Image (cartoon, rainbow, N blue to C red):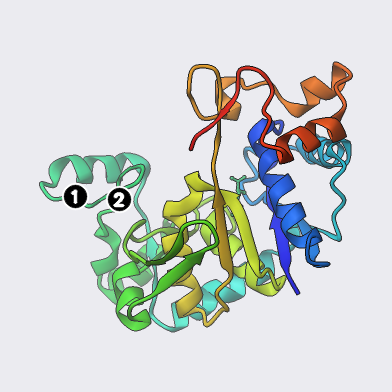
Amino acid sequence: MIVSRFAPSPTGGLHLGHAWSAIQAHDRARQHDGRFLLRIEDTDATRSRPEHVAGILEDLAWLGLGWDELSVQSERLALYDAALDRLREDGLAYPCFCSRAEIAREVAASLHAPHGPDGPLYPGSCRAIDPATREERMAREAYAWRLDAGEAARRAGPLTWTDELAGTAPVEPLMLGDLVLKGKDRPASYHLAVVVDDAAQGVTHVVRGRDIMPSTHAHRLLQAVLDLPEPVYRHHALILDAEGDRLAKRHGAPTLADWRAQGMDGTALAHRLRAGDLPAGFSFDR
Ligand code: GLU
């Protein structure tokens, strides 16, 4: 049975790009008598807001999208801790004491800082701290947990991922470097929580925007070292605004809530999107 999910972060109002993503995830399951899950990804407590959770539920109902199960990541933290424990026991996670400023200084001073899709990657400074110093610093300093991506990649061996639209491609396991698993003030990173939940919830089809593709490399690596099943991916095209920019909460894209308040018919909007017909001023990033 196909199980898909829409997994928004309640850090702002949903916009047209979210609607497009939710419709595709919903329809992927519904076309095959499958299950469509709604998962609120609120592990970033400083940016998540209850009013955005309420708005997401109203937006989906307005679009005519019903879900079979609603889950909230902040209620599932024990699962992410268990996964982190396993990575620690396997020697694949290490504590990182660095501040953002220290990381930036280290990157600036290094001639060969590895780069990822969003700029320089963590240079791995805390990976080599000796066990005694590590213990001692853990007792008195705040720290995050990071994945030892190099070691994880060695253990996982060659991996691929399969995308319904783009086909099968080799995984580049170091794409995101030694990513954060648990932050100094965040109980689980997006990467750890998403991988754990997709497996725990039996998600077979991960439908999401193409902008998240770089993370999929890291997600496949985490799945491999945690012995989790491999879902099929469907990274869909993004929607651009009149300036050709990707819709983003921070650029002030009109929200679905704005349109709802103006009396727009959400089900009609969903039908138009399914037919590939976007409202004036929007286009697909083909
Ligand atoms: N929570 C993520 C976001 O809102 C989406 C994660 C995913 O679909 O894997 O960008």
* 204 or 280, nearer to the observer: 280
Give the residue type at disc 2.
Leu
Give coordinates of residue 210: x percent, y percent: 50, 47
Residue 103 position within the rendered picture, expressed as x and y whole percent measured from the top left: 29, 46
User: Image check: 148 left or right of 82?
Assistant: left
**Earlier along the polypeptide chain: callout 2 or callout 1?**
1
Q: Secondary structure at mark 1?
A: loop
Q: Residue at x 53, y 72 (%)?
A: 84
Are dots 2 and 1 in contact, CB under 8 Å? yes
Identify which residue, 132 or 189, lies in the foreground. 189
Name the residue at 86% across, 37% down.
58
Q: Residue at x 29, y 69 (%)?
A: 133
**Residue named by callout 2:** 121
Where residue 92 appears, as percent x and y from the top left, is 39, 76
At which x and y percent is residue 232? Answer: 57, 67
* In front of the other: 182 or 56: 56
Disc 1 marks a residue whose amino acid type is: Ala
**Residue matched to label 1:** 113
The image quadrant of residue 124 is bottom left
**From the image, which quarter does the N terminus lie in?**
bottom right
**Spatial distance from mark 2 to mark 1, Cα to Cα?**
7 Å
Left or right: 67, with 140 as reference point: right
Q: Is mark 1 within 8 Å of ligand 1?
A: no
Q: Is residue 237 at least partly visible in the picture? A: yes
Task: Check disc 2: other Cα within 10 Å, few if <14, some if 14-19, many if 20+.
Answer: many
Identified at 25% across, 54% down, the residue is: 123
Q: Is residue 26 above or below residue 281?
A: below
Q: Residues within 10 Å of mark 1 (few under 14, many from 20)?
A: some
